């Protein structure tokens, strides 16, 4: 849309059936909006030079229409009794910039959100890694269970004592031997168990 075409100020035409005093303010608003439209377009394109100008102007047009509609409703609601705006050009341009920047932030957040979504390939690799990890854990759990069941009573008691944090010194005292003897006996039993289970 070029700046010579009808701009988004057309939204103010919906306020034509207002009182004569209010209509004067709406007409003034439409006149300023028409005058500002080329400046609005130039600002929008300058803010996003990497984007297609038509896309940028389409976004600016949506934001500008929304801003004008909001200001028009406020004018109608106040029915000409509000404090007059000294510089309507600056006010409207400020309203546009505020809303346009908010729209750009929203668009950036949405784009960033989609950039952080993992690809299908990444999700598949993650699922496979999780599946293989879970399978390894199940397999190890089964091996540990089998190993515990295959232990003789002394080795099982020593293993349980170690699991509960007892030292080799304490285990040795319990079994009536030194800590070195208890440790060696346990290691020997585990080595035999490994050999038996083929680990």
Image (cartoon, helix red, strand yellow):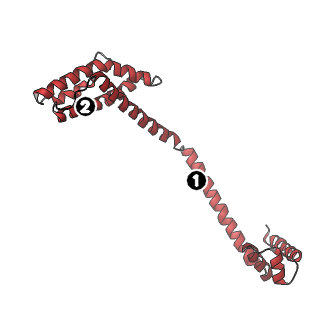
**Circles 2, 1 touching at the beta carbon (< 8 Å):** no
> Compared to 95, does 6 lie above or below?
above
Give the residue at x 43% y 21%: 46
Give the residue at x 88% y 74%: 180
Of the pair 184 and 97, the residue shown nearer to us = 97
- The answer to which quarter of the image holds residue 79 is top left
Q: How many numbered circles does the render carry?
A: 2
Q: In which quarter of the image is the C terminus?
A: bottom right
Q: Where is residue 175? Give x, y as percent.
A: 83, 83
* In this picture, residue 176 sits left or right of residue 61: right
> Compared to 88, does 176 lie above or below?
below
Q: Quadrant of the N terminus?
A: top left
The secondary element bearing badge 2 is classed as helix
The crowd level at tag 1 (other Cα within 10 Å; few <14, some 14-19, many 20+) is few
Of the pair 183 and 18, the residue shown nearer to us = 18
Q: Where is residue 98? Give x, y as percent.
A: 37, 31
The crowd level at tag 2 (other Cα within 10 Å; few <14, some 14-19, many 20+) is some
Q: Whole-Å distance between the Cαs marked 2 and 1?
A: 52 Å
The secondary element bearing badge 1 is classed as helix
> Compared to 182, does 120 lie above or below?
above
Q: Quick check: can you spot residue 102?
A: yes
The residue wearing badge 1 is: 127
- The answer to which quarter of the image holds residue 60 is top left
Q: Which of marks 2 and 1 is nearer the N terminus?
A: 2
Of the pair 199 and 51, the residue shown nearer to us = 51
For marks 2 and 1, give the one nearer the viewer: 2
Give the residue at x 64% y 61%: 135
- The answer to which quarter of the image holds residue 37 is top left
The residue wearing badge 2 is: 71
């Amino acid at each position: 849309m070029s700046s010579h075409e009808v701009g988004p100020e057309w939204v103010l035409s919906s306020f034509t059936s207002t009182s004569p005093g209010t209509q004067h303010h709406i007409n003034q608003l439409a006149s300023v909006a028409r005058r500002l439209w080329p400046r609005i377009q130039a600002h929008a394109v300058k803010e996003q030079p990497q984007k297609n100008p038509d896309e940028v102007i389409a976004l600016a047009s949506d934001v500008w229409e929304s801003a004008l509609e909001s200001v028009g409703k406020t004018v109608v609601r106040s029915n000409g009794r509000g404090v007059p705006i000294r510089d309507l050009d600056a006010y409207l341009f400020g309203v546009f910039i505020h809303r346009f920047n908010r729209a750009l932030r929203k668009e950036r957040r949405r784009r960033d959100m989609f950039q952080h979504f993992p690809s299908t390939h990444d999700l598949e690799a993650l699922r496979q890694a999780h599946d293989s990890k879970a399978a390894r854990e199940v397999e190890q759990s089964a091996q540990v269970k089998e190993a515990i069941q295959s232990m003789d009573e002394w080795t099982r008691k020593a293993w349980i004592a170690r699991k509960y944090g007892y030292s080799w010194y304490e285990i040795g005292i319990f079994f009536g031997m030194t800590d070195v003897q208890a440790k060696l006996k346990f290691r020997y039993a585990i080595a035999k168990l490994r050999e038996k289970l083929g680990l």
